[in-house]
Every structure is written in C-alpha cells, then in structure tokens.
Amino acid sequence: MDIVLPVGSSRLQPGPLDRFLPPVEVGTVERTLELYLQDAERLLDPFGASPRLAMECARAGREVLVAVNNPVTRFVLRHTLKPFQVSDLQAALAQLAAIPKDETRLEPFILDLYRSHCSRCGEPVQVEYYVWDKELGGPSHKVFACERCGYAGESAATEDDWNQALDYSRRTLQHALALEQVAPAGDPDRKHAEAALAMYPGRAVFALITILNKLEQAPIEPRLKDAADALLLQAFDTANALWGHPEGRARPRQLVSSSRFREYNVWLALERAVDVWAAPDPGVQVRQWEDDDASRAGEVTIYSGSARELCQQPDALAGLDAILTVPPRPNQAYWTLSALWAGWLWGREEAAPIKVALRRRRYDWAWHATALRTVFSSVAEAFPVQRLSLVYFPEAEPGFIAAALAGVEGAGFSLQGRALRADEEQLLTQWVLPNRRPAEPELEHRARGMERAVIEVLSARAEPTPYSVLHAAVWSELAGTGRIERDWTNLLRHPVQALTDEFEQLLQKPSIVHLSRGSEPQSGLYSLRSTPEAEPLSDRVEREILAQLRNQRRVSSPELDQEICRIFTGLLTPDRRWVRACLQSYAEPSPEGDVWSLRQEDQPDKRAEDREDMLRLLRDLGLRLGFEVQMDGHLNWTETSGKTAYRFEVRETSAWGHPERTPGLEGLLFVVPGSRSGLIAERTRRNPEFRTWLESGVRVMKFRHVRRLLDETTLTRDNLAQRLAIDPPEHQDPQLPLL
C-alpha cells in the first residue's frame, strides 16, 4: 500500500486568493504525472479547487476536464491559465482612477477616505492600514509613510482618525446596495448576507460599492472589464476583517474577525492587486464545456457547474483515463465570502449556485465526508471502471484525512496506496474502481485490524511518532479493506465520528506509550513500550542522505528530497525539515543556487583520518592527565584503581540507534564533527526519548573541542568536567574560559 510522495517546491510569488486555495507546491502535480499517470492522456478534476493542478497537467500535454461550481474559483482558474497582461491590469486601474466622482476623480475620492496626518510633522499622509480594536470599537493605531519627514511605521490613531472611521460605520446607501446585490429585501438569506457583510468595516463597504457602481456606469471594453473585476476581487479579500494584527491567521477558515484586525486602504489594495494577478503565461489553452470543438492535448476544459451536474451530461466522462484532484477543505470563510463577491461582481444569478453557503455557519468533518461521498458516488457511476484515481491533500490534517477517506471509499473506490509527510500535512492517495472488498468471512475484526496498523507503523518507524501518522495508518487500513463503506450503514453514528473515537481508545492500550504531558490524544508523540527491532527512521534517513551525497558529485535539494521519498515510502516518508537538516550538516550549497555537494571533510577517507586523529588526541590527552588509556570498543580513561572515569566513542554521524540498547551509558561521551550540531539540536527537538537520554548524563562533544582541550595549558583533572561541558552540541563556536 506504500507509494512514493511527489515532491514540489514552495512558490515565492503569492497568487490571487492564495490564502483560501489549496497550497499545492510547484512541481507536485508534474511529478505525480511522471510517477503514476505516464499513459493517462485525459484527466478529470471533479472539484477544480486548485488552479495549479489544471495548469501543470496541461503544461505536461494532458487534456483536463475540470468541474468548478464556485464562480470565484472558476474566475481564478481561468485567469491563472490565461493570465492578464500587466498592461491590461494597469489600463483597467487607470480607467477606474479616471472615472468622475463628486467633482473629482474616483482615485483621489477613495484615497481621501484614508487621509490622516503624520504624528511627527503633522503633514497629510495616506494611511496604508488602520489597526482596529474590537473591544474599543474603532481604530487604535495607523500605519503610514510620510514623504515629508521620512517617518514610516505605526502610530496611535487620533480622535480625527476615530471619528472619520465611525462616520462610515452607520448604515449607508452603499451598505444597502451591497446587500441588495446578494439577497434583496424579503430574501430568507438576507440576514445571513448581513452577517457576512459584517466582516467588512463600514468604510471598506462604502469604498468598494462606490467603485463597483462607478464601474457599472463607465464605458469599459470587455477585456479590461475582466481585468477590473480581478483587481476588485483581490481588493474584496484585502479589505475584510480577516487580516489579524500583528500576525493573524495565515489561512482563515471561519468567518470570525480577530480581536485586532487591519483595515486596509482600498485604493492601495487595488494598486497592489496588479502585481498579484500579473503572472507569466503558462502557454495552455482553455475552453468552455459548451464549445463545439474537440479538446486537444495541453488544453483545459472548464465545466461551469458541480461534478454531479457534469456526470449527468450524456457521455460526459467517456474517454477519460484517470482522476487527478485536490479536494477542497471545508472553509466557511471562503465559501461565504465567495457568495458575496460573486453577487457584487456578476449578479445574483451567477452567485446562486453557492448562495447556500451564506446559511451554513459550521462545517464539521462528518458533513464534509458526506459531501465528498456524494460527489465521488456521482463520478463512480459515470466513470469507466478500472481507472486509476489519485487524490492529493496539501492540508492533510487528521480530520480531513478521515473525512476524505470515508467519503471516497464510501463511494465505491478502493484504496491502493498512500504516502504521508506528516509535518507538512501532505498526503497522496491512490484509488481504483470498483471497490473490490473481501468476502465477509475473510474480514479481520475491525478493532484488531486497527491495532495491527498502529503496531506496524510504530515498529517500522522505530521512533516516537506523531498522532497524524498513526491516524493515517488506521484510516488507510480501513479504506483499503472496504470497511468504511459498510460502516456508513452498520454504525449507529457517522463513521468519521465513531471510528475516530474507536481509534483514540486504541491509543490507550498498555502496549502504546503516549509521550505527552497533556491528555489530548492529538498532542505529543507515541511509541511502543517494547523496543522495536528496526533502526530508528531518522537514523536510516541520515545514513541514506550521506550515501547519496557521497555517490553524487552535485545534487539539487528537490532532487535529493524526491530520491529520499522514493526510498522511504508511504508512512515512512521523512519530514522535509529533517531532510534539510541532514543536507545542511553534510553538504554545502554552490554559489549559483540550490545545488549541493558533499563537504570535503565528510569524504569517507577524510572522516576515517579524522577518527584516527581523534582517537590519538584523546589517548594523548588522557595520558597527559594521568589516566590509563585502554581500547575495548570504546576509548577508556581509567583511574589507577581500575575504575573507568571516562569513555569516548568517536562517530561521524548523529545516528544513535536505541539508547536503551547501548550498555553502560554512564560516563559515555560521544565525539562528533562540529557540523553535526544542527542535527543533534534537531533530534533533541523532535525526539523526547533522545532528549531524555542526553539529560540522563550522556554527553556529546565536538572534534574541535578535543583539539582545544589538548591546547589548554591550565587543564587538570579537577577542572576537566567543567571544561568538557564548555562546548555543548547546540552551541556554535564558544570561547574557552581564560581562567
């Protein structure tokens, strides 16, 4: 069941509405195609949640059919595949700026809403954003840059700032128009639209609706109208109260403003939206489902509706080779705001398919599992049998995994493979149709199967393991054996709720140790009470990275990461942070970019010389201090009475194995290269058992510290223990004391 996780890289330039869309890394979809779908020419994405998925598939020469029900997501998808020219975005902004408004132009009119005075010199300034305090009911601070005196930063808001903000908190004509365009008077959803509109400061509503009204009245060509819509869409997101201060939620999911939030200058938001929407042309073709011409390789066909509606079209999925999709994560904030934004930009009719989002205030995992099951059931009925399906999750938290696996397996798909990178919350699952379940007598008891899955993954990783990995092991076991589909009807409660409770009860068994001071099952790490036979996963990864570096002259970090994920598959996929720490410990980057080569001092011959040199230096140092020096697997410093005072073990890696299997830890010092400091610090952070081991009296010292001790003329037996502790592994380059 274990498969290889495709590796991507983070984007430097954020795209439109990035904080609401799935964070699919650059290259992840391309690698997925290379690994699993080499022969699949025509693909189906039943959700269209990730514009990057469609773009990378088309750039790889595949035909892609995408169903997108949300008009906002559809707009972002279309203009990710066919980006605006910067000149069009700038021209649209210029035309907006020039629209007449109250004996002036629209630009200065909107900017004047955010005009204040410099707290240093008193000159007029444009405020970039105000910081609102919900408890106070108004702005407490403002951020600006003064062109006259050069001051830039945050200052306390004045009484004039306060009064100007509150002038727009009253119900205005713009507020009424904002509601009317989504839910007119008498509409049962009007109160829900009002609740959504409350996420905007009154001044922002006034500014945005004023701009929208002027845009409707202005003669603007269709090409620039789309560009203007794009700028406004980004401004809609920038102007709401979901931007907390000072940090806030990077990816808001609930429509709840922070206790302190930023009220951004709407016109400055429009100006910055030009850079957000400007992107290189990916060189793919886009067509609508209704178009008569046939689709071609490298082309994306967009169906403006849900996957269920698409599957009801005659022969809609005929000729498709595979499913490749990124399911949406429940996001009440984005779905509710999308209903507002679609109504504002394109009218109530366009917003109708997602208007129901205004009513729903809470989306739990059971609801999401049912929704996913409905979609995948429609696809399963219309999709040709024996086709491969790949479902990728870039936000694979445990609840989402449970909901998705319950929904997909409950729709008749059979799980064939999984790969999870826990720290990054990345999961790839592989499915086939139909779900070939074993006959009822062949089924193992569910509880025994769940326990077996936990024991197997803990034994295979052989080190403290997070809850999310055990959770994925259990749910993939359930989905791979066809149990969840039965549980949709057999269990008294929803399977997501019932099976999660059963899993968390399993974690309380005596054979499993919860390494956490808290009582929450999701916190801390888990390990087996008995010591596993396997070498710890982090040790194996470190050794493999060193071997890869010694076998290759130069390697890029994404290539190395992908190779490590190819070797350690499924639930053994190592975290990127650990891979990066190993790479930095053993290799150095080239000046031209993210290409690494093994450090000269970590070449095998050089490390062998270093080891012999360390043993010689430790022998000389021990003799100088009056100890007898012996070798019995370790280098021992012995008192004349025969008692061993210090034992040294020289290692080139930070791979320690299982501490409980290392006899005689008392007085043992591990001597390692200084470049292993980062790895030891990372091990200490991630492994409480390793941290406890170090705290129990085991010490680590660096090669360079041995050399310094040998050169220290004041070193004696009396101050030896103090001097040995001078350079702990987490320190970089300490100075030895002079006295």
Image (tube, rainbow, N blue to C red):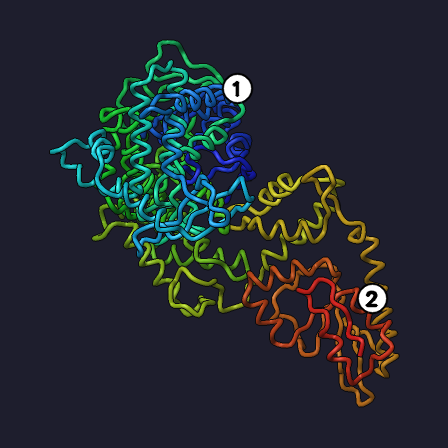
From the viewer's perspective, is residue 166 above or below residue 275? Answer: below
The residue positioned farthest toward the front in the image shown: 122
149, 457: nearer the viewer? 149
Which of the 4 image quadrants contains residue 642? bottom right
Q: Nearer the viewer, residue 300 or 658?
A: 300
Q: Quadrant of residue 467?
A: bottom left
> Residue placed farthest to the top in the image?
293
Judge whether residue 83 can be spotted in this image. Answer: no
Q: In this view of the protein, can residue 210 be seen by the observer?
A: yes
User: Which residue extends farthest bottom?
Assistant: 641
How many residues crowd around disc 2 within 10 Å: few (fewer than 14), some, or many (20 or more)? many
Residue at disc 2, secondary structure: helix
Q: Which is closer to the viewer, label 1 or label 2? A: 1
Q: Position of residue 18 (x, y in %)?
A: 44, 37
| Residue topped by disc 2 | 614
461 up-or-down from 403: above or below: below
Which residue in the structure is indicated by mark 1?
283
